Image: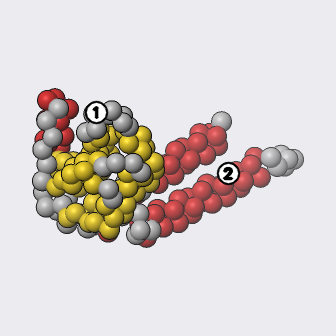
Amino acid sequence: MKNKKMIFGTIILLFVMIGISNTPNVSAEETIEIPPLSYYYYHMGYLENGDYIRIININPESGGINVYIMNDRQFSRLQDTGYFSSEKMWEDIAQISGWSIEITDDDYYYVVLYNDDILFSRTVVVDIEILYHSPAKSNDNNWNLLFIILPAIAVVIVVLVLVIRHKRKSSGEPII
């Protein structure tokens, strides 16, 4: 019973260590349908000064859409009042590709796609991502994960060796 608890605890420790070390890179690559007079948004998470929102491609397949980059305050106002305001906006675009927007204020950020057409939906191909200024936040820097996985593997090996040694000692025949 003690061995099972030790193995279970080790497995939980490994998952916690991997979860702490791995900050996911926020990205979206998909095709979406935006109904008439409505919007679709991507929550890009908390970004800091020097981070970038990279628009690889936003391509409406029929007609144009409006694209907004909003901070948390602006997005809350949009949800409360329906009023669009932001620092970065592209109106009635046919395609955006290869743009990077530098973040200058630490805040939560959103990319909002708005279909202002009254009658028709818009199918939009979206490919956006975050480029973090801090290498510790980026998934491109796999060293953080490596420094967690290697010690975790070592812990598992040590626990297994201890369990096997304990079983060998306890399974021996008594000496007369």
Precedes in sequence: disc 1 or disc 2: 1
Q: How is the image coloured?
A: secondary structure
Q: Which mark is residue 160?
A: none
Q: Position of residue 129 (x, y in %)?
A: 35, 59
Left or right side of 124 for 3: right
Q: Position of residue 86 (x, y in %)?
A: 13, 48
Q: Position of residue 109 (x, y in %)?
A: 23, 49
- Residue, far top: 80
Q: In the rendered picture of this protein, how many numbered marks are placed on residues?
A: 2
Whether 1 is drawn above or below 169: the answer is above
Of the residues tagged 1 and 2, which is closer to the observer?
A: 1
- For label 1, the SS is loop
Mark 2 highlights which residue? 163
Q: Tell which of 153 and 92 is nearer to you.
A: 92
Q: Tell which of 25 and 9 is nearer to you.
A: 25
> The disc labelled 2 sits on which kind of residue?
Val
Which residue does the image show at 67% across and 58% down from the upper left? 161
Left or right side of 150 for 164: right
Which residue does the image show at 46% across and 50% down from the upper left? 30
User: Where, by quadrant of the figure, is residue 1 drawn?
Assistant: top right
Residue 55 visible in the current orientation: no
Which residue does the image show at 42% across and 51% down from the upper left? 61
User: Are there few (<14), some (14-19), or many (20+) residues within 10 Å of tag 1?
Assistant: few
Q: Tell which of 89 and 137 is nearer to you.
A: 89
Which residue does the image show at 27% across and 60% down from the upper left? 53
> The disc labelled 1 sits on which kind of residue?
Ile
Mark 1 highlights which residue? 118
Q: Tell which of 16 and 43 is nearer to you.
A: 43
Residue 108 visible in the current orientation: yes
Q: Position of residue 117 (x, y in %)?
A: 28, 38
- For label 2, the SS is helix
Q: CA distance from mark 1 to mark 2?
A: 68 Å
